[in-house]
Amino acid sequence: MASGLFVNPATLLNVVPVISSTCQLWFGWDQYEFLQLFLKRDIQAQSNQLLPSYFTTFFNRGAPRVGGLLLTTIVSSAANLRYAPGNLLHERGSFIWYSAAIGFALGHLTYFPFIFPHIRAITSDAKEKNVTELKNWLYVHNWRTLTVDLAGWVCCIVATVKTLSPVSANGN
């Protein structure tokens, strides 16, 4: 009936970290896809000229989105840890996965000292070195995406699947 149209709020809370971490991972991949175009050999001279303006706009718009997605993953995972009934997450084995998801989302931020010098160089116009700075930024960005962002996404999926999976008749 009509009640089948609504999602249980607890179930929705379990799924939010999957959604936000998926968006984070997707956004990271898109950043690579769109920015690596500036590295093409035949347009590097133009890229060196365009990158300061483009990257400033890109970063000013993208950083709040990334921050919002990370915050959503952290807060929703923490809310699952805090508000799950009784020992449900421990019994289902998902407590550690939600905890790890928080750790990996915070781990995204630990890359900032390695990325910020490249951001500053490009936005300050490193002239003929903008393409090189972008290449260096993408290198660190890709490692971050393939380590903490991917691991966080996996943790969110495992936590959600474990939490929402029905318990079998024999208790396993």
Image (tube, rainbow, N blue to C red):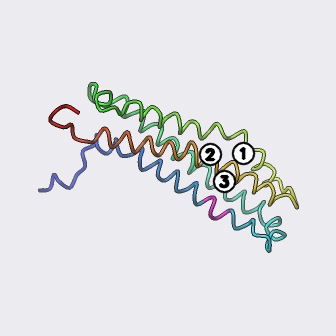
Front tag of 2 and 1: 2
Residue annotated with mark 3: 60
Residue at 32% x, 30% y: name it.
89
Q: Tag on residue 115? A: 1
The three-letter code of the residue at mark 2 reads Arg
Q: Secondary structure at mark 1?
A: helix
Front tag of 2 and 3: 2
Q: CA distance from mark 2 to mark 1?
A: 10 Å
Front tag of 3 and 1: 1
Residue at 56% x, 42% y: name it.
148
Q: Quadrant of the C terminus?
A: top left
Q: CA distance from mark 2 to mark 3?
A: 19 Å
Q: Position of residue 157 (x, y in %)?
A: 40, 45
Residue at 64% x, 47% y: name it.
143
Mark toward the start of the polypeptide (2 vs 1): 1
Q: Secondary structure at mark 2?
A: helix
The three-letter code of the residue at mark 1 reads Ile
- Mark 3 packing: few (<14 Cα in 10 Å), some, or many (20+)? few
